[in-house]
Image (cartoon, rainbow, N blue to C red):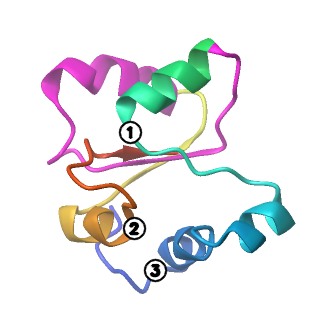
């Protein structure tokens, strides 16, 4: 579980908040269960998944675990998730 905001993976996610960095790396960050469901339904594949179990709703756990089987998955603390989240009232998942 990642509990430090100084973790290199967390620092990279923060860099991806800049459009220039996303374009340079060819990476899109998706936050939120509804958005992830839409992306998966459209055939998108995910390389990394970040889950905060404390924020993830019980009804969303099955879908999150299915996504976790398809890519690298990191469990992160609530403090770290709130640091990288770009939306208010996020539901604890980011890819």
Rendered location of residue 40, percent (x, y): 59, 20
Rendered location of residue 3, percent (x, y): 28, 72
Using the image, determine if residue 2 lies above or below residue 91: below
Marks 1/3: CA–CA distance = 22 Å
Q: Nearer the viewer, residue 71 or 57?
A: 57
Q: Which residues are magenta?
A: 42-68
| SS type, badge 1 | loop
Q: Quick one: quadrant of the N terminus?
A: bottom left
Q: Specify whether residue 58 is painted magenta.
A: yes
Rendered location of residue 75, percent (x, y): 35, 52
Using the image, determine if residue 21 lies above or below residue 34: below
Q: Is residue 24 left or right of residue 36?
A: right
Q: Which residue is mark 2?
A: 84
Marks 3/2: CA–CA distance = 12 Å
| SS type, badge 3 | loop
Query: Is the C-beta separation of discs 3 and 2 under 8 Å?
Result: no
Marks 2/1: CA–CA distance = 12 Å
| SS type, badge 2 | helix
Rendered location of residue 73, percent (x, y): 49, 45
Residue visible at 54% across and 71% down in the picture:
9
Q: Is residue 57 left or right of residue 90?
A: left
Q: Which residue is mark 3?
A: 7
* Crowding near the residue tagged with mark 1, few <14, some 14–19, many ≥20 C-alpha atoms within 10 Å: some
Q: Along the polypeptide, which appears first: circle 3 or circle 2? A: 3
Residue visible at 39% across and 67% down in the picture:
84
Q: Along the polypeptide, which appears first: circle 1 or circle 3? A: 3
Q: Which residue is mark 1?
A: 32
Q: Along the polypeptide, which appears first: circle 2 or circle 1? A: 1
Q: Specify whether residue 43 is painted magenta.
A: yes
Disc ID at residue 5:
none
Please identify the quarter of the rendering in which residue 39 is found. top right
Using the image, determine if residue 18 lies above or below residue 78: below
């Amino acid at each position: 579980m990642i509990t430090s905001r100084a973790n290199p993976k967390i620092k990279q996610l923060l860099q991806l908040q800049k459009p220039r960095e996303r374009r340079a790396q060819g990476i899109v960050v998706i936050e939120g269960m509804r958005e992830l469901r839409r992306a998966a339904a459209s055939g998108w594949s995910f390389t990394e998944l970040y889950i905060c179990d404390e924020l993830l709703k019980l009804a969303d756990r099955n879908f999150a675990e299915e996504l976790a089987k398809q890519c690298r998955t990191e469990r992160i603390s609530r403090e770290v998730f709130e640091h990288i989240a770009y939306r208010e009232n996020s539901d604890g998942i980011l890819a």
